[in-house]
Amino acid sequence: MWIEKYRPQGLDDLLSHQEIIATLRTLISNNRLPHLLFCGPPGTGKTSTILACAKEMYGSSFKSMVLELNASDDRGIGVVRDQIKSFASTKRIFSSGVKLIVLDEADAMTTAAQMALRRVVEKYAANTRFCIICNYVNKIIPALQSRCTKFRFGPLPADDVRKRVLEIAAFESVSISSDGLEALLILGKGDMRRILNVLQSTHLASSGARGGEITADAVYSNTGAPHPGDVKAAWGWLLERTFPDSSAKLRTLMQDKGLALGDIITELFPLVSTSSLSKNAKMYMFESLSDIEYRMATGSLEKLNMAALIGCCKFASAMNAGSFSL
Amino acid sequence: MASDSLLWVDKYRPSSFDELSFHEDLTKRLRNLCSSNDIPHLLFYGPSGAGKRTRAGCVLKALFGPRADKKKVVHRVFKVGESSKQVEVTTVASSHHVEFNPSESGNNDRLVVQELIKDMASFAPIDMTSSNVSIKKSLKVIVLHEVDQMSRLAQQALRRTMEKYSRTCRIIMIAESVTRVLEPLRSRCLGIRVGLPTEGHIQSVLSGIAKREGVSLPEPLSKRLAQQSSRNLRRAILQFEATRVSVGGLDLPPGAPIMRGDWEYACNDAAILMTRSQSAQQLVHVRKRLQELLAHAIPPDVILRRLVENILNIADDEICPEICQLSAKFDRNLTNGTKPIFHLEAFAARFMQVYAQFLRSQAVMLD
Amino acid sequence: MYTNRVMGDRAWGCGGERWLRGARDASCGGAHAAPAALCKCASAAKEWNRAHCRGSQSCDIGQKKKTVFVCCTLGYNTVNLFMSVPMPRAITASSPRKKKQKGTKQKKSVTLLITLIRTRVSISSRLQPVLARVRCLCWRPSCCAIWRESLDLSFILLYPDLHSDRLRRLRPSLGTQATSTPQRSRLAMADREGSQLWVEKYRPRKITDVTHQDQVVSTLQRAVTESAGRGELPHLLFYGPPGTGKTSTALALVRDLFGVQNLRARVLELNASDERGIKVVRDKIKTFAQTTVSNPVPAKHGDTRKYPCPAFKVVILDEADAITIDAQTALRRTMEAHSKVTRFILICNYISRIIGPLTSRCAKFRFNSIPMHAMMGHLKGIAKREGVDIADDTLRSLIETSEGDLRKAINTMQSAHRMHSMTKGSLDMDMISAVACLIPPRVLDMFDAKTAEVGLTNSEVRKVVDEIVMDGYSVSQLLSQYGDRLLKDDGCDGIRDMNDLQRSAVAVILADAEKGLNDGCDEKLQLYNVASKISRIAGMKDNVEGLLKIQAI
């Protein structure tokens, strides 16, 4: 798997977040590492950072000084009480420095387990440091948050990502067109892992095809996301064509490309904002789109909501033309 | 009266296809089904009082003969998961079938359904003495009542269980509203729609019962009974019996008063209050009625429905669409909310406001 | 409230008074029957009771004449008549002032009462929820606030004859432990001969039998012959509309890889209705994924095919969109960690419902919906082999109602065939609608015509709705089929006459009503609303403002 193969090994290999890395480096060298709380969207380098730090701190005795627990391991309150506590309370002979416990995907820990954890964090602060990694910081109880220093990992900036992707593509001899690269970046939304995964699976899927170049079409069809061109065309039909016509065309589009109505609505939203409809029509469209999305989320029939989508687009264009308002 | 304490509803419930008196084409189809070698899973659906349960019973009798009539009540106790909580379920069983109501166990219905069906299906059927080895004789049948009230998880579990054990047991489901039955479950069963009988059918059933009981039922009374029952046969028979008891004796006068539930009168009252005058003071009176109804454990959606129907009968045709819209809106709030009195009262208040406006505009037009 | 347990899964019985349901058997004691005194209404009941009880205070024990008025409910709404039930000895009096006696004692006495009432009810009705509200004038109604809510409510007349129809009590059979029956997966089931479902009988056995998914089939075939032998099969993700062959392909694939005899050891199949929360991922799947592969069992006698039987195991997760996000997250680590020994095949309808990290670990295969002519071919073949007499255009409308889902179409055809096996002549659309819980075309036509008829009074519209609901048709299905007609420009004059904006308004109204039904609202009220709105829309041909207002919820 490419994400494992190209995972940054040392602190120098990390792509971005240079300020965080600099801070960490200073703290490590001064031996004043606090408890850490890494939060941010997935695929931005949180786990890689802490693993790289750990390697730098411990070198070869990495395995015995670091305990790593993630969401697929049982991390209930029992484990906190036994495993973590026993690891935290022992000190290795002939070694100075603190041990490290990494709790990955900590948002999945129950509140009760987190409560039990906070006491452990306090008690064994002398010889253990905790690193809590999560996506949503509000899922970590405030008591734990206050015991740690928070580092926020934002989505990776596009330029860094682009450079790295081209590097990896060169290593793996994958040819990727420029619009393919852009599509990759848009879909990835600053999540390096996702981008690499999509790149790898698109490469696998198109390796049988001629040339094997990764184009934007290949990327979109591989992830099941609607192509922006398709959505734009759909928006055009919805506004201009008659009711039965637009329904037939929309249905064919969804069937051919295997799209869900929810995906289309997500992509439609920015199109509505930038369209040339009147203010009233836009307001009406936003409200209707949100109603449709709400209904779909609670399990309504897709067919009827598709009809409702067509209906409100028709009303929007009527409002635009005749300057009506609600 | 001392010898048989059964209600007329139960006493004269048809137990075989020959005794069914309406929906003949449905009966014919069911007969065909039962005479074939194998039956699929069945789903009887339709409004209450239409005869779904009766027909399910007839199917059982047709399949298994008179043995199906020998029923016993069995209480089963199940353990819930690892905790020591126990769930108790009342089932009615004969040697070939088991019936129970999964929604009785509340949140544990999934567990109950799985356990019970697994139990049933894993044991060999009792009727081993029969030399007739046709498939249907060796089947066990599980009858589930009120399937639409089961939680979604329980329905999914049921679907899987149906697949697994379809060799040894068949499931007959009875539901009132087929919308609430999951689509995969519906597609695994043969759907049998049982609609409500017409008033003519009801009248003929009532006169049949009257004859067997030796009670004289004059035509106008029978017609009124059929009308007031809103095509619900069970209700009609029960009202008939109640009328007969209240009158005493065997000769019913045509003008005998037909008893209705207290709560129906209360709903009617509330509706009349709301349409007669609209003010804050009136709202207080209406609220009192509504609270009383709720205190008597009438389900709030029944209250709302009855209220709306009464109002629609009283109010002008022009305002009716608005009333329908209001009722739909407050019905939604009622379903999603937790305190029914708020929503019922809100509906009453809003209705009164709308109605008052309407009346005023009518008055203005007349001037 | 107890409503909407399909979608909402809310706590049962929250709010409001709580009513006991279906009490346990308790000892009936030696109650004596007294002749019933039936009263016509509450006031008369009050009089009667006052005449027989000493004042309105508590009823003493030992006074057998003390009676209790009971309103009972059974089934649907009927009549309430009060009847007097002689109070058995065991019921302890509880005066309103003695609040301490509330609780277990009251519960017991209530239980007894319910049992007494139940003895009156014939066995066949015994499963209906019996709710008893002890309307004893000695007790304040608010004392009875300990019972769970009943679902059906009505009032019923009961005869106070306790002796006949006594409840036969059996010793309650002790709790059944969860015995682990051998998991009969669909693999095993389909292989057994004589499987009754046509869907199982004609399910494709080999990958090459799966039709109309050429790209998938060719890639998988390559995978089986070449890479699987080398152990290079990636994790797979099959997605697409329901009934297009995803599960069949997965099953055929594992059968081709391992042969039937190895399936139980090498394959773990989990479906949406099995437990699949995060705990199961951590325990079951992880344990299965971690154990090393066993040696392959030799093929059965007579089976000459050579199975590659590569050195890994397969976990098939069917309906993967129903796995919670937490469980999916936990799953991804497992997939990563044990990817040498285990392969995962995820099957879902929409790929967007699987989290990104999982989809990016899998090779994705899209299953297209099967086109009309292919389905016709399939169904015709099955019809010939099973002896079903069905005309071509009936078959076509059957396929249309199944919306590209082959499984649904086959099931419907099988059910219709079973139901009408004795009738002569071929199956027609009416029979098929009856079987598949669909609304028959004539009912839909009537609804269409009546609601769109301009000038119809509201009461007439309501009559139409009443008819439909009383006949038992599913309102949600009605809305769905009506929506179909709207989209496809089918139907009779009602819809055809509507212009685009009118249709749009109707569409929005339908979607909203369907959501309401989904939430569990009352069908009749929602349909009243829809019908009255459609009938207003029919009269608003060019009135854009009016239409806007109507569809604004």
Image: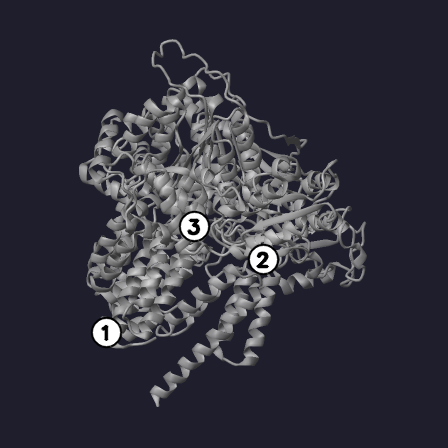
Please tell me if label 3 and label 2 are on a single chain: no
Report the residue marked by disc 2: A138
Report the residue marked by disc 3: B47
Q: Are marks 3 and 2 in contact (CB under 8 Å)?
A: no
Judged from this view, the residue extending furthest toward the front is: A29
- Position in image of residue B222 (x %, y %): 43, 55
Return the disc, 1 or 2, that comes first in the chain's sequence: 2
Front position in the image: B332 or A70: A70
Q: Secondary structure at mark 3?
A: loop
- Position in image of residue B247 (x %, y %): 55, 57
What label does residue A321 carry, if any? 1
Chain that bears disc 2 = A
Identified by mark 2, the residue type is Asn
Identified by mark 3, the residue type is Pro
Q: Nearer the viewer, mark 1 or mark 2?
A: 2
Can you say whether C461 is above or below C401 in the image?
A: below
C73 horizontally vs B358: left or right: right
Residue B9 seen in render: yes
Report the Cα–Cα distance between label 3 and label 1: 47 Å
Q: Looking at the figure, which quarter contains the N terminus of chain B?
A: top right
Q: Quadrant of residue C22?
A: top right
Can you say whether B144 is above or below A244 in the image?
A: above
- Position in image of residue B107 (x %, y %): 58, 45
User: How many C-alpha atoms fall within 10 Å of the one at disc 1: few (<14), some, or many (≥20)?
Assistant: few
Q: Residue at x 76, y 63 (%)?
A: C56
Judged from this view, the residue extending furthest toward the bottom is: B367
What label does residue C399 carry, if any? none
User: How many C-alpha atoms fall within 10 Å of the one at disc 3: few (<14), some, or many (≥20)?
Assistant: many
